[in-house]
Amino acid sequence: MYLRPNRSLAAFALAAVVLGGLASPAIAAGEKDKEALKLHDQAMDEDYLAVEFDKAEKKLKDALKKCGDTGCTPAVVGKLHIALGTVYGGSNKLDQAKEEFVLALKADPNAQLISGLTTPELTKAFEDAKKNAKPGKPAKPTGGGEEPGGEEPGGEEPKKPAGDVDHTPAAEQAVNTPVPVYIEIPEEIGASKVTLKYKPFGATKWKTLEMNRVGGGFGVEIPCEDVTTTGDIKYYIIIRDEAGDPAAQAGTMKDPYRVPIKREIEGDEPSLPGKKPPRQCAEKADCPPGLPGCENTKGEKRGDKGWGATCEEDVECQSGLICLNGSCEEGKRDGDDGGGKPSTGKKNVIGVGAQLDLMIISSADNVCTQQGIANEAYYCFYPGGSEQFYGDPIAAQGTNGIQGGFAYSGIRILASYDREIVKLGGGTLGAGAKFGIALGGHPSAENLPPKPPNDDQALHLQAPSFPPIHGEARVWYSFLGSPFEHRKFRPYGFIGFGVGKASASVPVQVCDELQRNGEEVIDPSDDACDRSKPAVRRDLDAYQIAGLNFISAGGGVVYGLTPNFGFSGELKVMFMLPTFGVIISPTIGPVFAF
């Protein structure tokens, strides 16, 4: 009567033991997954991308050791072997990569290569591994290899690539046709430079294109040369701030965007905002006139680079595009039929330069007599200082006069900006300005002229000060086209006006009738002065001072060493007003064009 309950209790205990024994291995089989996956992520996201394959290999082997026989689920074990095979592939150890792929497929028949880190060589090794692994169930494609298109297991659409900024890729594009890529970036990111990293189907290396501002965002076209076969083009976008630091991404190298390339597309042709859909490029075997890559009427071959692609010459761009400011853009140059003569002309030029001033000194007599009154252009100073001469020179042969010629006037350090305004004839008309400082000039008098007795007229005026400024506006004409062009000489002529003073000195000797500090009168036997009058001989510097305004005219030449950098040299004549003087000024300095 008590056996039945005891037998029921025993059966229940036996079932609990059996179920507990089955559950324990299942729980233990995944207890190391988290630790193993952490090592996996460190190896692939840090070491592998930094091309430190030895470190990545060690971490993955440590992860497999942690898993042991039952510590990780089959999916994690397969993932670790796939990653290790990928690392071996990066070191060109394809036999070892194949062995790891075999182990991965034996652990997990659905294991797939890592999207974004796959090469044709790894794909072949993986296919060979499938034949040797003989998994119990055939692996389902997941789109992780180089297969064009592809869906996730179960027929689901592929997941949207990770990233900080939303982006919608072109749905598809036809073969031999540039692929437009466009992205709008939130203002708070402060995008200054946007770079497209892309990999054509079957390629082993990523390529780079700088994206240009277009519409409300940034855009570029992947050129025809990388769209020559069907398959997926992969890409991701890197956004940098004003400091040049990465600020955000759309897609990643491991998880890129894809655009299927097909023989024929079913939907609308993709294009950048406000731009026409790119035209299909010519295949090598079929090259009718007028298509990119074909010869034009001038026998010149056009390239296949689309809108926004970097360039140095028009011939690199598709027909109908020109190379402007370093990128292919829509337009046509004057007199060009689409052939695209090489051109890197720029409309804006900024520069700095050193201007040497040489004054044409006029011959004159009595330069130190009644300075600023009878001789307003000349002022005399004692040498080596800023004390002005206020004496009363007597008439004596060979004194108080100067001979004409060139004299050093000073140096001006100037910054300039010039802008092309309109094309005129075979050249261009433009305008510009120069601003800077003048170094040199005459000293500022530290002493005042003496007051004349009995309110008589003063003998001299104090010399005006020398303001060290220079400002100039000008119009110019560049005779051979744009004011700046890569590897071209661009001669120009100009006229202008401005504000600035100039002065130069020559030595002069005077016989001063006025004595200073009890100086001795000159020896009457000295023929330098008139013997009939007591006078002191003085050696002075006579400054010719001109300005404060001027009219300028001259010419020069600009040569572009690179598409944006070069040198400028010019020769200028300044006619100083209202106190007249003539300054000859050569100038040389570097320029930057854009």
Image (cartoon, grey):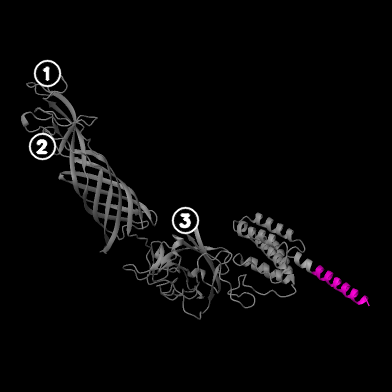
Instruction: Write the start and end of the magenta stretch as one range.
Output: 1-22
User: Tag 2's secondary structure?
Assistant: loop
User: Tag 3's secondary structure?
Assistant: loop
Q: Disc number at residue 244?
A: 3
* Apparent side of residue 323 relative to residue 394 in the rendered image (left or right): right
Q: Quadrant of the N terminus?
A: bottom right
* Apparent side of residue 213 relative to residue 418 in the rendered image (left or right): right
Vertical order, 140 against 435 (above or below): below
Tag 3: Cα neighbours inside 10 Å, few (<14), some, or many (≥20)? few
Residue that badge 1 annotates? 525
User: Tag 1's secondary structure?
Assistant: loop
Q: Disc number at residue 398?
A: none
Q: CA distance from mark 2 to mark 1?
A: 33 Å
Kind of residue sitting beneath label 3: Gly
Q: Nearer the viewer, residue 113 or 487?
A: 113
* Apparent side of residue 197 relative to residue 366 in the rendered image (left or right): right
Q: Disc number at residue 373?
A: 2
Tag 1: Cα neighbours inside 10 Å, few (<14), some, or many (≥20)? few
